[in-house]
Image: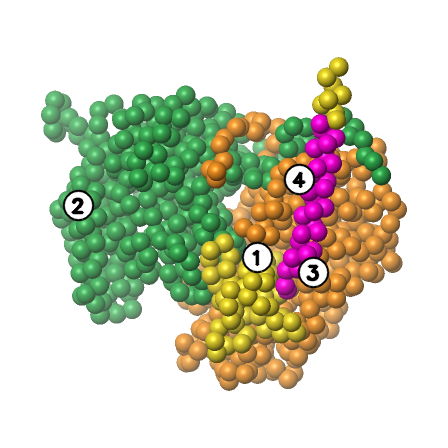
Chain colours: A yellow, B green, C orange
Amino acid sequence: MCLGIPGEVIEFLPEQPDLARVNVSGVRRVINVGLLSDEPPVPGEWVLIHVGFALSKIDEAEAAAALEFLEGIGQAYEDELAALRDSQIE
Amino acid sequence: MTQQLASTPPSRPRRVLPTGEREQQVLDRIERARRRRPKLREERITMSHGAGGKATHTLIEAIFLDAFRNPLLEPLEDAARLPMKGVGEAGGATVALTTDSFVVSPLFFPGGNIGDLAVNGTVNDLAVAGATPMYLSAGFILEEGFPVADLTRIAESMRDAAAAAGVAVVTGDTKVVEKGKADGCYINTAGVGAVAAGVDLGVANARPGDKILVSGPIGDHGVTIMLARGELDIEADVESDTAPLAELVASLLGAVPGVRALRDATRGGVATILNEIAKAADVGVLISENAIPVRDQVRGAAELLGIDPLYVACEGRLVAVVDGDQAAQALAALRAHPLGAQAAIIGEVTAEPVGLVTIKTAFGGTRIVDLLVGDPLPRIC
Amino acid sequence: MRFVDEFRDADKAHALAARIAALCEPGRQYKLMEVCGGHTHTIYKHGLEDYLPESITLVHGPGCPVCVIPMGRVDDAIHLASQPDVIMTSFGDMMRVPGSNGAFFDANARGTTIKMVYSPLDSLKIALANPDKRVVFMAIGFETTAPSTAMTVLRARAQGIKNFSVFCNHVTIIPAIKAILDSPDLRLDGFIGPGHVSTVIGCRPYEFIARSYGKPVVVAGFEPLDILQSIYMLMLQLHEGRSEVENQYARVVPWNGNPVALKAIGETMELRPYFEWRGLGFISHSALKMREACADFDAELLFDVPGVRVADPKACQCGEVLKGVLKPWECKVFGTACTPETPIGTCMVSPEGACAAYYNYGRLNRQRVPEAISIEPSRP
């Protein structure tokens, strides 16, 4: 029920301004983007899909920031692991 | 703010949370409850009973096994192995017999139609019994008003599928029912084949140390059917994987003597077969999510629909349980055949936990893969 | 899959796990509640608890909109579906929820037509294709889903569809959280906040939790790394003595929510004075019904709905599980009388229910599972 999947907007349907075709891993689906009418998505943008509607746009900058944070933690972890390993070779 | 790691960090993903004694008692109680004979509580048949999961198993055990009980039926494998004394050469032969009914909707879909399923499905049930498929029967239940052109297409597909599989349709039956019943066309096929001497495949043979293989990407058929129904506004380039597996099986059995069991993964998917192995052989099954081949589009569609590809039907994939020492040869034998090009080793049989299938997720954690009660995708085959 | 796979990366999980463990004060136990059923599902499905130290317990909350539907409402729905010429449409999760005389599946076996749909919009297609039938959509869900129902009603009006109505069972999340906070049985340290509800209502509604109750809240995404990172952020707040609302799911959740969605809800629905929640009893201003202006789409007005209150079976302890007081396996009937095949309560039927998640995924003595086997990944 909370199910929300990210999908990339491919195109709008010609006579139906509220409907857009999205791509999820090669699967194409028509969804209703009426809930984003304040700032309609453009092809190439990503949206969160829930029961046939786009609920929100995916902010790529925020996504990148989130991944960067995780990379950072991952890197620091690797560094500490390495330091620990090195310190054991004695 | 620097953090010092308190002790040697684990090289494996996790801290194993020890299961408290009370929780373990509950788990044991549940295991005992699961082993009891299932009772059929419903007064009427529901769609869950046709899904291939728990409800189907309960129905089969409570009604059919109870009514027909005999040692040849009890293993409940894909085909029954029948000793035929005084038949054939030198003191008798073992014949494999199987039957399947096909109620798929829609009748025509990318990759094939109900006719292809009707032939390949039965051929495959014989093949995984270690039998050479030989003869099929075909019974049709047709709805009044069904287009003859469609029936011709179906029959021609069956002819071609039978030729490709090396079998002959030797007998059949046709009935017609009033408009509104049979949804166009239902087909039942039964098949017989000869089991080679010394071949004794069965999921009860599985033992700890065995490896589990699948012959290719899972979930293609079920997702294809779902999308072909046209109710979902979803398009994807997937097609049914329906195919005859007798040749693939023959090359596997020829290359590797240590095959314990073969199953074709249809309704209920790979997860159902894994559970049948764990239950029949009283073993554990452990698989690795990263090792399971799934096409990107099948994965995408499954995520969109909130279903797990492990439970989605295939129609041209087999699951093999193989002696651990011969797993590499088995994999090579499968991959050498076009239908097994993307075969993979997905897991192994373990001594514990008995009767349970567990999966190491891509994320690194562990969880169970249980039988579903119903099927997220009805009328797949 | 983009925006999904990156957040399931096992290597980053180890790193986060180490950080989380390092933030635990020796000797202290932590209880964090994930409100959302979708989070419960993710936690069990990916085996996320394997990454947490013993001192952190995750408590499963009531954010499963199927789980909180009382048996009486299921009976009402079946009664509706049994009216002449009615086609009921429903999300799949509802099909096996037991009423006092079986679930939707059983009702279909007795002759109703209750069809599974993936979107409320599918109901409109069915209504157009069956002009002589009356289509009733069984609307469930928190604020996540209410906008979709609202948009469907507005679209039906715009298209002049007259044979469509909604049986509205939408509920709101804040009263449920408040019921948890006011419950004397629980002592929680923090909340993993609902993800998709927040895309609609934003993050402000949770501020009272941090301000008045002093508990940190982190709005979390649904991939396992999202949840793990949210736990890290909660532990950091606790370590630093802060109690704030933070947004881990910023790539999807706007701080101010979705005004268009809220407007659509406002145009079509209004709060009921009170509503019965399974296990939590009657909660005021916690559920939605169709507005008067949309009376022509209100199934409760168009049809006669019995509205009988049905008490939960005596054996059922869903209420305590929903509040996080009991773990699923602590329920007396868990796994024996109450299984996914023979569910007594909703926690076992809904895929997001804590009992279903634990039974289907977590019912495992991890010490008995052999260490990771080395298997080649199938993808190169």
In the rendered image, which residue does mark 4 sit on? Answer: C12
How far is mark 4 from mark 3, CA to CA? Answer: 22 Å
**Residue C54 spot, x, y in % from top left:** 74, 34
How far is mark 2 from mark 4, CA to CA? Answer: 53 Å
**Residue C200 spot, x, y in % from top left:** 68, 66
Q: Nearer the viewer, residue A6 or C352?
A: A6
The answer to if B11 sits in the magenta stretch is no
Give me the chain letter of mark 2: B
Residue B61 in view, yes or no: no
In the rendered image, which residue does mark 1 sit on? Answer: A5
Secondary element type, mark 4: helix
Give me the chain letter of mark 3: C
Range shown magenta: A56-82
How far is mark 1 from mark 3, CA to CA? Answer: 14 Å
Mark 1–mark 3 CB contact (< 8 Å): no
Q: Nearer the viewer, residue C41 or C5?
A: C5
